[in-house]
Amino acid sequence: MNQRASGVLLHISSLPGPFSIGGFGPEAKAFGQSLVQAGFRYWQVLPFTVPGVGDSPYLSRSAFAGNPLFIDLRDLVQRGWVTEDELSPAYTDASKSADYEFARQIHQSILRAAFEGLTDKERNDVRRFERHRPWLSDYAAFSVALDVYNGETWREWPDLDLRSHDEEFVREFIMDHQEDYDYYCFEQFLFYEQWQALKRYLNDIGILIIGDIPIYVSENSSDVWGHRSLFQIDDQFKLRAVAGVPPDYFSSEGQLWGNPLYDWNAHEAEDFKWWAERLSSNFELYDLLRIDHFRAFSSYWSVPPDHKTAVMGQWVSGPGLKFFQKMRRKFDHLPIFAEDLGEETQDLNQFLEEVGFPGMRVVQFAFDATSDNKHRPHNYPADCVVYSGTHDNDTLAGWYHRLSDHSKKLLCDYSLPGTHREGGQIQEASANDVIEALLAILWRCHANLLVVPFQDLLLMDSDRRMNIPGTPSGNWAVRFTQAELQAIDINKFSLWNACFSRIGR
């Protein structure tokens, strides 16, 4: 990250293809080739985790397991595990929106058929994979239990020994459901195999992958079930406090996420082993890692579990610098940058300086404050990662149209200084010109790394927004057609990347 470069944010689920959700097929390779032609160096994705409530990849049943919906089913035919006839029900026209429910049903049906056709040697390959993934046993057993108990959360499972994760009982449970357990291991084996092959290809052509790791995990996850002592949970399996953030740009009531909070003393007593394994797993998946809500390592917002909003929480000290001192001893290199958005505190700024990771800037936060606003492009340091917007923001075009007249004028004066506007009024027809000029400013800015959501490359409006924070449904489903991916202005962006020294390899 000490060299100037640019990247594009587009989640795997948003890729085109013949199935109801994007995946690891040839469409991903084609998109990588387009990035190379346009001079980009990075491709940022959202968490690869199994999506949870509302199809969110930030609320997963595991911090480690990959989303099996990304597995390219065409590969199963090439391996001889399923026939074209067996695959045919999976083909569908879902070009503008991912259909998670259909994907879950059809993918599992076809992957089950493939699993049943494995040879003894192939099953041994899966078992070898499982032995080298310490998290996989809990994940597979947890997934089986969700099936057995019709999706009930682990706190509702009828057997106390299973709820309590009694190791001997869990082993017996696995043996009683060995075939289903092996199937979930097979899903992960195939996910990792396909992704590693795709990642090698992308790296070879000059594209590095930026991953995103949520700071917290879901309460109903194999991580909490299998490591309950590492979270703020009492002996009756009840949460002592939950995660969130105080009122901010996105919500006047704050955001009540509801995730269990870490018991950092318990983590430290285990030399942060769980976190080391989590980082190691993510470094295997990605070349560079964004840690979402990074500030929680410094201090986190703790909310009583019975509150309906996040307003009445309190800041509590996190593990601080000693956590990263431990991680630096465990890893030769920590390719990490911090999502440090939200409320600023003096301790957070000092912590970021001490830990030494780049922070973030988002230009959509730049034009509702004074000129010393850190999100305004002329204030960017070299050592930061700049976004035109994140997965939680509106598209640039949608954001522009919702700005107040005052902010629009400020943005226009900033992006196109000296441009004449009749009668002093901002003309709506100039919106694309203003956004285009703002993007050009971002390309020229001092920040070493610039990341732009795919939507902003094509100046798409709010209907292609990925997520609206605080809304429980209707998110994460945006998808792009092959024609839209091919509409990237290769000549313009390759020129910008070359002119402003953001050229790829």
Image (tube, helix red, strand yellow):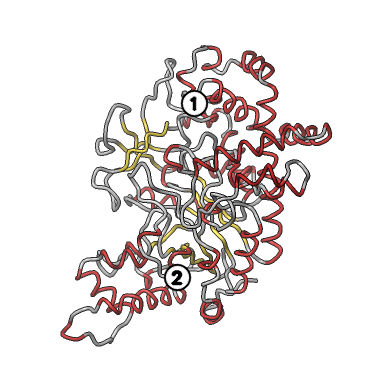
Question: Vertical placement of 172 versus 321: above or below?
Answer: above
Question: Vertical placement of 474 versus 116: above or below?
Answer: below
Check disc 2: other Cα within 10 Å, few if <14, some if 14-19, many if 20+.
some
Q: Residue reaching furthest right?
A: 121
Q: Which mark is residue 458?
A: 2
Residue 63 location in percent, x, y?
54, 38
Disc 2 + disc 1, Cβ < 8 Å: no
Residue 109 location in percent, x, y?
62, 36
Q: Which residue is mark 1?
A: 151
Judging depth in this view, the residue of 262 and 182 nearest the camera is: 182
Sooner in the amino-acid sequence: mark 2 or mark 1: 1
Label 2 secondary element: loop
Residue 85 location in percent, x, y?
69, 44
Quadrant holding the C terminus: bottom right
Amino acid at pointer 2: Leu
Quadrant holding the N terminus: bottom right
Residue found at x 53% / y 47%: 47
Question: Vertical placement of 104 versus 393: above or below?
Answer: above
Residue 375 location in percent, x, y?
35, 64
Amino acid at pointer 1: Gly
Label 1 secondary element: loop
Please indicate whether residue 117 sits to the left or right of residue 249 in the image: right
Residue found at x 54% / y 30%: 223
Q: Which mark is residue 347?
A: none
Q: Residue reaching furthest front?
A: 85
Please indicate whether residue 15 sits to the left or right of residue 411 in the image: right
What is the CA distance from the residue labelled 2 to the residue labelled 1? 40 Å
Please indicate whether residue 159 sits to the left or right of residue 283 in the image: left
Instruction: Examine the image and state in which quarter residue 278 appears.
Output: top right
Check disc 1: other Cα within 10 Å, few if <14, some if 14-19, many if 20+.
few
